[in-house]
Image (spheres, helix red, strand yellow):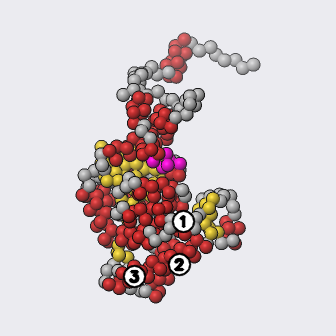
Amino acid sequence: MAHYEQLSKDKLKQAHQANFVAPTMTLDDWPAVKGYDFNKPFGANEFFASLFTTGFQATELAKAISILKEMKSEKATVFFGFTSNMASCGVRDIIAWLCKERLVDVLVTTIGGVEEDLIKLLKPFVLGSYDTPGKVLRDHGINRTGNLFIPNDRYLHFERFMNKFLERVNNEYTKKGDIMSTRQFCAELGKEAGKLDNKEESIYYWCWKNDIPVFCPAPTDGSIGDMLFFFKQQHPEFKLDLADDIVDITKIALNAEKTGIIAIGGSVPKHHIANANLFREGADYAIYLTTATEFEGSNAGANIEEAISWGKVKDDAKRVKVVGDASITFPLLVAGAFKLDIKQEIREEKNL
């Protein structure tokens, strides 16, 4: 049996003091950490309000809801950026609703974020599995995005749609000496979508109908880029002007009294929006939704403090970064900001 030397009272006192530092602040007036009480009948307002006191990213999401509500109440010009995977999944339908209701003012996305919305008007994507071997899918002409399956026939339907569209805009613009910007290109795609029976499902139909500008800074990085390659073999005169877009989006930012950023993920859309706001000494509001971290220096993972260092977001801006899968966090953000009134409940939880 091991023998342990008895510690002196001074040693014990020293150990106790090292283990416990007496608080100089009680924080008694701060909100207590508390989750939703499922013992009571379920209430959506109360559930969303409880996010604020839940802690971790639930609290950040509650902050995002509050900031978005303030953006709209202050009539800020809302710049909304998203990557193509949001059009791939069901978030696309939520974005279409936001555009229908004019709850966002400017869209910036990748070309995948444009074409996948339009492909779905022709034939839907389907739910699959993360685990299906890539070779099995390839052998059967099926593409996978996460747990979504996209058979190749979708692109055949889309190619027919685009060939007709490209012939039209080439005749209406290029052959008359005009060069389309991507803003005009996306607006014309929305107009073309308006010819389809299910047009109201489309993001770009509602952007065209409600005159919401859409910018796509990388228009060739996708299926549309492939189609442009083949189209230009017969029509080498066809061109898109990216320079006009940077003028247009920057002027929108400069002319806005207040601006807000909602950025899902990173990539070109997030930076395009942030850079436009640089010219007005930063956005007044910023909400980032991402799974990326800042450690590798990526645009997707960059914190809002980094944008403040560049002057793209104001140092006194209302701001929050919510870390999590946007297919979960974004629907909750929209529901909390536009379908529920949780402002009063949050104030009560904070004892304000």
Marked residue nearer the N-terminal end (3 or 2): 2
What residue is disc 1 on? 120
Q: Is residue 221 above or below residue 329?
A: below
Q: What's the amino acid at mark 3?
A: Asn
Does residue 333 belong to the magenta stretch? yes
What residue is disc 3 on? 170
Does residue 175 belong to the magenta stretch? no
Tell me, for residue 87, which label it has, or none: none
Q: CA distance from mark 3 to mark 2?
A: 16 Å
Q: CA distance from mark 1 to mark 2?
A: 14 Å
Provide the residue span drawn in magenta.
328-334
Q: Main secondary structure of the magenta part?
A: helix
Tell me, for residue 160, which label it has, or none: 2
Marked residue nearer the N-terminal end (1 or 2): 1
Q: Specify few, some or many for label 1: CA neighbours under 10 Å numbering under 14, 14-19, or 20 or more.
A: some
Q: CA distance from mark 1 to mark 3?
A: 24 Å
